[in-house]
Amino acid sequence: MKASLPAAEAPVIPVRVWDLPTRLFHWALAASVVGAVASAKIGGNAMVWHFRFGYCVLALLAFRVVWGLIGGRWSRFSSFVRGPGTLWRYLRGRTSADEHLDVGHNPLGALSVLAMLGVLAAQVATGLLADDEIASTGPLARFVSSATSGLATYWHKDWGQWLIIGLALLHVLAIVAYALRGRALLPAMLGGDRALAPGTPASADGLRERLVAAVVLAACAGAVAWIVSLGA
């Protein structure tokens, strides 16, 4: 009786999933959020850095919104923001390979991405309006009533920061869970490529795309500087 031969593994090739601007955004945002939280906990003179990190987060969020419209294929919102029907099929394992739902952010991971972007946007917005009535005042606090500024301060110092910390922990736990299941996510966010089936669409990541990203980021940074200047 002949021994059965193991089935041949499907061929895979490196496919560029995360373009360089998206990767730099990811790590810069992580560093800025950690810096903002740490400097807030330290307090005192470190609050100067808390504001600076907050402004960096705002510029990066603005960049990500624009890049989500014009960036590499798998960085675009259209590639991973799906409707309830697709999410339900994904959770039931009833999707087809040609949908490529697991190449970038899968439909479930997309919810985490949107939640993180939304909470960070709310945190930055409330920070701009906040006033602790001691030494730290957001640049736009002068344009709202003391009651509105008080509500913004409460959210920024209480619910907002804990939501960010909670989402960050969930993000780390998801990375660990995927790694334990044999799908490491960090290598692709470091190098940009994933081993995928031939024919999988790749993200454009050439010099042109990177120059466009640099211009977009510069414009976003300039817009943030203008917003900050309003409080001068």
Image (cartoon, helix red, strand yellow):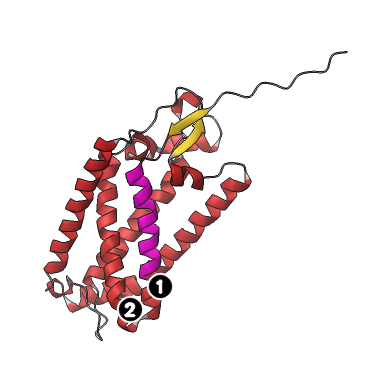
Residue name at image x 29 percent, y 66 percent: 54
Element on which disc 2 rests? helix
> Badge 2: how crowded within 10 Å, few (<14), some, or many (20+)?
some
* Separation of residues labelled 2 and 1 (CA atoms): 9 Å
Where is residue 59, by image quadrant? Answer: bottom left
Query: Could you say where residue 16 lies in the image, as x and y percent from the top left?
Result: 41, 34
68 relative to 128, above or below: above
Residue name at image x 25 percent, y 44 percent: 213
The answer to the question of whether label 2 and label 1 lie on touching residues, with beta carbons closer than 8 A, is yes
Q: Is residue 93 left or right of residue 151?
A: right
> Badge 1: how crowded within 10 Å, few (<14), some, or many (20+)?
some
Figure quadrant of the N terminus: top right
Q: Work out whether residue 215 or residue 47 is closer to the camera in this orientation and state it.
A: 215
Q: Is residue 39 left or right of residue 58?
A: right
Using the image, tell me which numbered label, if any, was put on residue 38.
Answer: 1
The answer to whether any part of residue 102 appears in the image is no
Instruction: Identify the main secondary structure in magenta.
Output: helix
Badge 2 is on which residue?
Answer: 46
Query: Could you say where residue 78 lies in the image, as x and y percent from the top left?
Result: 33, 36
The magenta segment: 18-36
